[in-house]
């Protein structure tokens, strides 16, 4: 045996101890110095201390934010911003479009988003795949120049294949196409839809793979955005993925519901800018905005003021979270929230509870039948906090509804991809849109009220009636809610 082997045989326990101290100490220091949430810092330091060898490995995989604060160069940011600030209507009168108290919210969102609030937009509501998919496919079939599609889940099923076929027809007409799918969402169906895209020669990319280049997704970071922009003129966004369980003729009695939106006007440029950022960040290919954006469009009627709010684990972290805090603070009459996954953190819970205690009527609509069992357990564990403050919590009957809708005082709305849970508000790349319009808010309120009409109200008594073993289970799962 060599002297090195003898040394290792005799001192390997000491070397392992030294290695664990170095690795554990480094990971604990990094977590303490970089985490802005004290609970996250404490949790990770605890994991590292309790398991000084496995803990640092877990922290390296799931705890380190490797996303650069600048996705692309500052010059590229300035060039894109130049194309997203046009507003043919001039100054926007928030008091006329919504109500005077929303002026302060407008000021807040100016500081949260790099996009300005723009008038001269039109927003159409599309209910579930029965309305959204035909409208999206029709837009793809009418495309003349460009198609940009970004989604979280793109299933290889009957509806996914319809989209691939439409994209293939567009490619044959000479339309330039880019498709961006989240690396986790692409694996919701096997074989993945990427095989079909590749066979048809449709350029695509997977968002967020690990830094070593292996086609294994990051454990904790995902793009949850849903964007379709055709010819730089018409856009679609909201919360709907591409999968057949949203279509009644396919899913039959088990069809899931959702709400998607068709948009026209200058806010389409903002949707496109977000896509171009994500595409360049993923592929390093810089697509020319002036080619992908329509040179002009006819102002739609009626028009609303809108802007995109994009958030993610980069320099726009917690943008949607901060916007919601501002919106809850200016509410005076009625707050309606519909979310399939209602797991707000303590700060957001405090804002909701404070609004209710101020006398604002707060309606929160959640699912009676949730597609994520663990999330449902965690949600149930904290419902008493909002019910005790006077909020009305409604559990819906019937099929699962994936809609994410918020309205304030019948004048301001937030639509998009964000759920009210830690993953959406801190870990995912999300895209939402704030809209100042009484007409649209009333229509969204009607949809939420329709859900309430066949819902059961949650009371402190009904929560207390849950057997102790289930309440204990719910609380244990709730402890892990930041990682669900």
Image: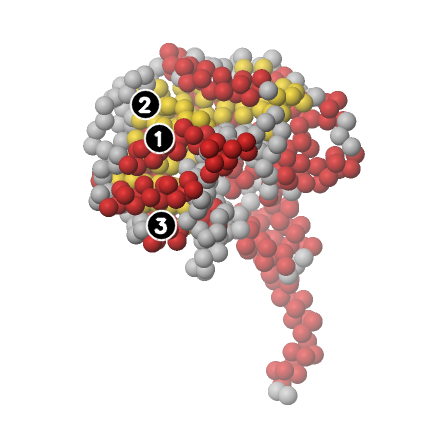
Label 3 secondary element: helix
N-terminal of the two: label 3 or label 1? 1
Cα separation, mark 3 vs mark 1, equals 21 Å
Q: Position of residue 299 (x, y in %)?
A: 25, 21
User: CB atoms at circles 1 and 2 under 8 Å apart?
Assistant: no
Cα separation, mark 2 vs mark 3, equals 32 Å
Cα separation, mark 1 vs mark 2, equals 18 Å
Split into 4 quadrants, where in the image is the N terminus? Answer: bottom right
Which residue does the image show at 61% across and 87% down from the upper left?
Answer: 2
In the image, which disc is placed on residue 121? 2
When asked about the image quadrant of residue 475, the answer is top right
Q: Position of residue 173 (x, y in %)?
A: 22, 43
Decide if residue 268 is on the left or right side of residue 64: left
Label 1 secondary element: helix
| Residue 457 visible in rendering | yes
Label 2 secondary element: strand
Which residue does the image show at 60% across and 42% down from the upper left?
Answer: 484
User: CB atoms at circles 2 and 3 under 8 Å apart?
Assistant: no
Q: Say few, some or many: other residues with alpha carbon within 10 Å of mark 3 (under 14 / 14 to 19 / 20 or more).
A: some
Residue located beneath label 1 in the image: 135
In the image, which disc is placed on residue 197? 3
């Amino acid at each position: 045996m060599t002297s090195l082997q003898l040394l290792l045989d005799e001192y390997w326990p000491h070397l392992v101890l030294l290695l664990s101290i170095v690795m554990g100490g480094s990971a604990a220091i990094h977590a303490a110095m970089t985490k802005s949430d004290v609970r996250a810092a404490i949790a990770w330091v605890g994991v590292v201390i309790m398991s000084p060898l496995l803990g640092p490995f877990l922290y390296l995989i799931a705890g380190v934010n490797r996303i650069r604060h600048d996705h692309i160069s500052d010059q590229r940011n300035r060039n894109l911003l130049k194309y997203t600030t046009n507003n043919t209507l001039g100054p926007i009168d928030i008091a006329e479009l919504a109500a005077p108290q929303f002026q302060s919210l407008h000021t807040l969102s100016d500081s949260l988003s790099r996009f300005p609030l723009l008038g001269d937009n039109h927003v159409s509501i599309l209910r579930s795949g029965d309305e959204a998919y035909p409208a999206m496919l029709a837009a793809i079939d009418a495309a003349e120049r460009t198609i940009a599609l970004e989604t979280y889940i793109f299933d290889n099923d009957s509806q996914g294949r319809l989209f691939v076929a439409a994209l293939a027809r567009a490619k044959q007409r000479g339309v330039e196409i880019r498709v961006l799918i989240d690396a986790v969402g692409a694996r919701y169906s096997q074989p993945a839809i990427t095989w079909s895209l590749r066979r048809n020669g449709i350029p695509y990319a997977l968002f967020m793979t690990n830094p070593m280049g292996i086609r294994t997704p990051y454990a904790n970071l995902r793009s949850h955005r849903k964007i379709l922009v055709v010819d730089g003129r018409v856009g679609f966004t909201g919360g709907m993925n591409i999968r057949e369980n949203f279509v009644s003729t396919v899913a039959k009695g088990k069809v899931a519901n959702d709400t998607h939106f068709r948009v026209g006007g200058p806010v389409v440029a903002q949707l496109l800018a977000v896509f171009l950022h994500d595409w360049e960040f993923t592929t390093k290919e810089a697509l020319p905005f002036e080619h992908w954006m329509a040179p002009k469009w006819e102002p739609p009627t009626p028009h609303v003021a809108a802007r995109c709010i994009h958030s993610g684990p980069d320099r726009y972290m917690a943008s949607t979270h901060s916007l919601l805090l501002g919106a809850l603070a200016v509410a005076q009459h009625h707050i309606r929230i519909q979310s399939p996954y209602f797991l707000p953190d303590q700060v957001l819970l405090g804002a909701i509870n404070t609004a209710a205690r101020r006398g604002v009527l707060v309606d929160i609509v959640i699912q009676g039948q949730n597609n994520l069992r663990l999330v449902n357990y965690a949600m149930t564990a904290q419902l008493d906090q909002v019910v005790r403050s006077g909020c009305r919590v409604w559990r819906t009957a019937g099929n699962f509804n994936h809609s994410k809708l918020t309205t304030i005082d019948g004048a301001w709305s937030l639509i998009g991809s964000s759920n009210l849970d830690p993953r959406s508000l801190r870990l995912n790349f999300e895209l939402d849109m704030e809209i100042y319009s009484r007409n649209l808010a009333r229509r969204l309120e009607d949809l939420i009220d329709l859900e309430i009409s066949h819902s059961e109200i949650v009371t402190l008594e009904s929560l207390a009636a849950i057997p102790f073993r289930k309440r204990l289970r719910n609380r244990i799962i709730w402890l892990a809610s930041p990682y669900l």
